[in-house]
Amino acid sequence: MKLIARLLRLNGYLVSTTSGMIFLVLAASVVIILLFRSILPASLAANESSDYVSFYEPVARNLLAGHGLVTNSGTAAIQYPPGFPLLLAGLFGLAHLTGLQESVVLLAFTLLCTALNAVFVFLLARTLWKPLPSLFVSLVWMTYPIALWLTKQPSSEIPFISLFFGVFLLVWSAIVRNRLGWAIAIVSGVLIGFAMLVRPIAIGVGLIMAFMIWISYTNTSIRHRLFLSAMLLLGNVMAILPWQAWVHAKTGQVILLCRNGVPSILDGLTFSANKLTWREGAALPADVAEISRDILDRSQGVQTFGSLLSLVADETRARPTTMAKFFAIKAARSWYATDSNRFETPTIVIQILYLTFTIWGSLIVWKRGGMPKKMVITVWLMVFYFWGMTTLALSIVRYMFPVMGLLFLFLPGVLSRKLSAVNDTA
């Protein structure tokens, strides 16, 4: 209880003066999502998440039925981490307990998470800006087309972003207020671990948050910063250790978070040649498309990172220029591509618009120095991390979605001096 009270006091300086605005952000987020869902054509409203249908939902129902964490075939469900199936099982169970339709409970959960996400963005913005530009940042996030699109169906990204934004706010506000202690560091590490158990892309987030402590919490000694960083990473390990132990007990192997690492990277290399039912053809240069087909033909039996690395190394030695072009294309597609290869042209236009202003705003905030500059460093380091992970795997904009909310924090920098006045606490 003392820890909870401490965490509440930590953010009290933000909440005490902006409680009315927080309510406004919560209400606006719910209204915008409901409005979006109401006007979305039926042809686009269907659940298009192949992972949800093939893995998350079946595993959740098996959990609810008492069969354990298994797939429909009875094997241990380790293709993905257990976080989202556990959440779904709880939501399905709540629906059965209350007599509500599952779709209603899932929608309520989506509304709750997205409303919290908007509030977290607003509170992060308040550490940099006055109330009005902070509201502007949250409004941009709430109306971001990709954010709205993900709310049309159950998605692991939604709760993941709640954890991701929440822990970023917790650590950053503690640093700004000079109140980062060992307890908050451990709690933050545990929350990052929970995020990893929802989406494994967060596997390196703890290291970046530790770096944020290192460069930003300069009011304390190097030794204390090292201690706090170690506490954060300890909490990270504590959160995932039970899952790692369970996986080892079931498989006899050490598998970090899940087994989908190699398949995900292969999918990112073969997406244009692997004609899945939901995926339209991606327009690639002829030489790149040929490499994609060759990797697909040779991918049978590739199950380990070693064999995958050997396959990629062979193709790189044979056609180094084409492979370099392939990864450059994958890096670019990370910002606009979709799993189905649909709507990519309008997404490019949208992303260019948003990225132009976020980069511009980042440069302006950078020039102000101090804590705002350190925020820019941390956010862009997080962006490059997610960009690298997305380029390595299937390069789609959905995987870059979490860091877009952090980039939006710098948008007020491009507004007039009066509107974008920096918060005194920054």
Image (spheres, helix red, strand yellow):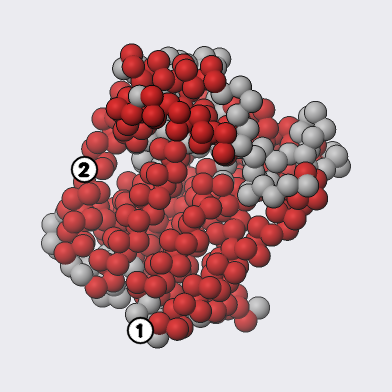
- Residue beneath the point at 47% across and 52% down: 117
**Can you identify the residue that label 2 sits on?**
356
CA separation, marks 2 and 1?
34 Å
Specify the label residue 219 is tagged with.
1
Q: Nearer the viewer, residue 317 or 79?
A: 317
Above or below, 162 relative to 53: below
Above or below for 296 versus 38: above
Quarter of image, res 74: top right
Q: Position of residue 249 (x, y in %)?
A: 80, 50
Q: Secondary structure at mark 2?
A: helix
Identity of the amino acid at label 2?
Answer: Thr
Secondary structure found at label 1: loop
Locate residue 126 relative to residue 152 in the image: left or right: left
In the image shown, does 206 or 104 lie closer to the viewer? Answer: 206
The disc, 2 or 1, on the residue closer to the chain's N-terminal end is 1
Residue 364, image x, y percentages: 17, 59
Q: How many other residues sit within 10 Å of disc 2, few (<14), some (14-19) or many (≥20)?
A: few
Query: Residue at the spot x=28%, y=71% of the render?
Result: 371
Q: Is residue 371 left or right of residue 389?
A: left
Q: Amino acid at mark 1?
A: Asn
Q: Position of residue 257 (x, y in %)?
A: 63, 48
- The reply to whether residue 233 is in sight is yes
At x 21%, y 62%, the residue is 366
Q: Quadrant of the N terminus?
A: bottom right
Residue at point 36%, 50% (across, down): 383
Q: Is residue 51 above or below residue 228?
A: above
> Residue pushed farthest right?
66
Tell which of 387 and 109 is nearer to you: 387
**Classed neighbour count for the residue bearing mark 1: other residues with Cα under 10 Å, few (<14), some (14–19), many (≥20):** few
